[in-house]
Image (cartoon, rainbow, N blue to C red):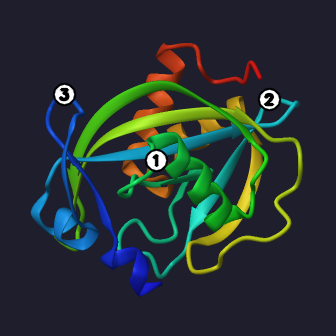
Amino acid sequence: MEVRHILENIAVVNDNDEIIGYKEKMSVHKEGILHRAFSVVLFNSKNEMLLQRRSFSKYHSPGEWTNACCSHQRENETIKEAAIRRLYEELGINDAILEEEFIFHYKCQFENELWENEIDHVFIGRYDKDVESFNIDEVHEVRWISVSELLNWIDEKPEEFTFWFKILIKKAEELKKLYTKY
């Protein structure tokens, strides 16, 4: 795992998602501090969703399947700029069209005693190319999957998916966002 990502300062927020400061990422996760995050969901023209399997070296949720990418907002960038930056850093994608579609809050503690306590901004977009290469420190593998196949997989083997992705999918389904309009 790249040390710089663990040591970076991320946006700490209040219950209204207003930034109240920046704090080192690992301490935020150790202390369960509320912070701002984003999740990027990408669809192709066949309405398949891009999934990534997290690297087995990740400090939480290693080897679990999740959305195209997710991370945190740093100082001196907007949440959308953070999403665009991280999509490139993890998957080498720099030309996806993204729009923020909804926000949700979740909190969970992992087996390693770390916490996620995030207000998660969900960006949905379109990308019609194969993922040629990805950052192996972050991503183990990627695949495109139909929404119906994904929903069946989550029902049958929920333990194979990240905690937040299951919440995101349920919320997206309720809001009729399991497709791309772009």
- Image: 37 above or below 138: above
Q: Which residue is mark 1?
A: 158
Give the class, few, some or many, for how many residues have Cα within 10 Å of label 2's Cα (few <14, many ≥20): some
User: Which numbered dot is residue 82?
Assistant: none
Could one spot residue 79 in this view of the protein? Answer: yes
Q: Position of residue 129 (x, y in %)?
A: 89, 49
Of residues 58 and 86, the one drawn nearer to the viewer in this rendering: 86
In space, the residues marked 1 and 2 are separated at their CA atoms by 22 Å
Left-right relation of 4 to 149? left
176 up-or-down from 179: above or below: above
Nearer the observer: mark 3 or 1; the answer is 3
Residue 97 drawn at (x, y percent): 73, 35
* Numbered disc in front, either 1 or 2: 2
**Residue 47 image label:** 2
Q: Judge left or right: residue 83 versus residue 73.
A: right
- Which residue corresponds to mark 3? 16
Q: Residue at x 64, y 79 (%)?
A: 136
Categorize mark 1 by other alpha carbons within 10 Å: few (<14), some (14-19), many (20+). some
